[in-house]
């Protein structure tokens, strides 16, 4: 079944430089539009002056899943051109806007990239979170991060150069839903009884023994899921991405405009709306069960059953900013990921077993020294 999408936003026109007519692009350090040709800085004013229809809006999920597709072929709108390439190693699809080219994959560093032809079937992102952390700030943070890797090989700082740092917009889906749930369970309440027993000497003694009194319990839960995130990326390692989330999508999203992505790499989603919806449903079910668990009275519980209904489900397709470093050490590849808005960093690293061995030996020697001093202390 083809997935559907909202109609393209009206905010897709160019912003020309007032000095040289070049195409402006977003500059994270200045938090403004900057001309890459003459350096003119132009404050971003959309949001106050956005065209009708350019606001960040939610779209009905069921309608998008059931109706014919629309709003696809993003990147082909008037105002800019795009080129797609796919890595033959990690399979990530990168979108380059207005002339930027690549010789290696930004996600894994592989040189095996080929042109990717599409049938213009990608749902158009209608909003994004622009970069807030600049490249210079990110390089400083990365140097500190590498410096704090105590058990990494000494050569790591030179092998994992920040020269491979790339700013990338990742595809995300956000979901809203109102849930009404009815739960029932057996609530356990602890109480204590005295019990007699004989010790090793045969003497009779008493002790307190914990018992559980089980009683039926039931209740209701009302909860609203607001902008629950499901990544559409395959290029960034999922466990790292979870560590640098969340992105402040509730307050700081801007209507999509090519100026934000011009000069940056954009990953085209490979987790489509159908799969993302299922992942979101599974995540909501787990969280609803956890919320109901907290409502069961008593000290413990068992046989929890939850009957939940989800209504008003909506979605958005957005782009979220990350800084990414991909490097190879030995025969293995590693990634370091940073939230391009908050600066949170998570990364992978090799380990030096020589350093770990010396650290373990040092701890053992310290323990041995303490024990020895304790035995030789005069009484």
Image: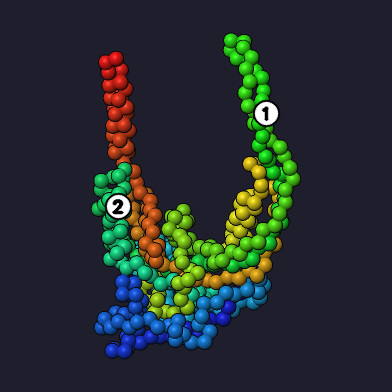
Residue at coordinates 26% horizontally, 81% vertically from top-left? Answer: 39
In the drawing, does residue 112 fall left or right of residue 71?
Answer: left
Residue labelled with disc 2? 146
Give whichever of discs 1 and 2 has the lower sequence position: 2
What secondary structure is marked by label 1?
strand
Look at the image and tell me whether residue 102 can be seen: yes
The label shown at residue 302 is none
Image coords of residue 357 (percent x, y): 31, 34
Position of residue 286 relative to residue 200, above or below, is below
Q: Which residue is mark 1?
A: 193
Q: Quadrant of the C terminus?
A: top left
Q: Circle 2 — which element?
A: helix
In the image, taking residue 351 as reference, residue 81 lies left or right, namely right
Residue 163 horizontal/vertical position (percent): 28, 62
- 222 or 210: nearer the viewer: 210
**Front-lying residue, 68 or 212:** 212
Image coordinates of residue 164 in percent, x first then y, are 31, 61
Q: Is residue 149 above or below residue 31?
A: above
**Foreground label between 1 and 2:** 1
Q: Give residue 196's position: percent from left, percent from top.
A: 66, 19
- At x 43%, y 63%, the residue is 87
Q: Residue at x 71, y 37 (%)?
A: 213
Residue 119 at least partly seen = no
Which residue does the image show at 30% across and 25% down from the upper left? 370
Give the colouring mode of the picture. rainbow
């Amino acid at each position: 079944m083809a997935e559907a999408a909202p109609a393209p936003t009206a905010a897709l026109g160019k912003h020309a430089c007032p000095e040289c007519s070049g195409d402006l692009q977003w500059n994270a350090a200045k938090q403004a539009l900057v001309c890459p040709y003459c350096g003119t800085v132009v404050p971003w004013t959309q949001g106050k002056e956005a065209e009708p229809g350019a606001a960040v809006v939610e779209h009905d999920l069921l309608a998008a899943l059931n109706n014919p597709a629309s709003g696809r072929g993003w990147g082909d709108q008037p105002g800019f051109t795009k080129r797609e390439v796919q890595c033959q190693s990690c399979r990530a699809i990168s979108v380059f806007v207005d002339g930027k080219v690549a010789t290696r994959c930004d996600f894994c560093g592989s040189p095996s990239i080929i042109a990717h032809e599409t049938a213009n079937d990608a749902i158009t992102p209608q909003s994004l979170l622009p970069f807030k952390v600049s490249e210079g700030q990110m390089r400083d943070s990365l140097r500190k991060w590498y410096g704090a890797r105590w058990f990494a090989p000494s050569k790591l700082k030179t092998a994992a150069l920040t020269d491979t740092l790339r700013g990338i917009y990742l595809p995300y889906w956000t979901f809203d839903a109102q849930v009404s749930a009815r739960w029932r369970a057996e609530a356990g309440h602890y109480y204590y009884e005295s019990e007699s027993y004989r010790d090793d000497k045969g003497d009779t003694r008493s002790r307190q023994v914990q018992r559980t009194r089980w009683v039926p319990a039931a209740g209701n839960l009302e909860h609203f899921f607001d902008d629950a995130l499901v990544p559409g990326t395959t290029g960034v390692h999922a466990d790292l991405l979870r560590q640098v989330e969340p992105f402040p999508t509730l307050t700081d999203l801007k209507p999509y405009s090519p100026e934000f992505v011009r000069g940056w790499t954009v990953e085209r989603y490979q987790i489509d709306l159908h799969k993302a919806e299922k992942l979101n449903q599974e995540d909501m079910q787990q969280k609803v069960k956890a919320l109901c668990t907290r409502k069961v009275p008593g000290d413990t519980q068992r046989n929890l059953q939850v009957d939940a209904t989800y209504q008003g489900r909506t979605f958005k397709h957005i782009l979220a900013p990350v800084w990414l470093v991909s490097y190879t050490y030995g025969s293995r590849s590693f990634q370091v990921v940073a939230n391009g808005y908050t600066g949170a960093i998570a990364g992978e690293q090799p380990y030096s077993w020589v350093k770990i061995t010396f650290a373990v030996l040092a701890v053992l020697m310290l323990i041995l020294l303490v024990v020895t001093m304790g035995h030789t202390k005069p009484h």
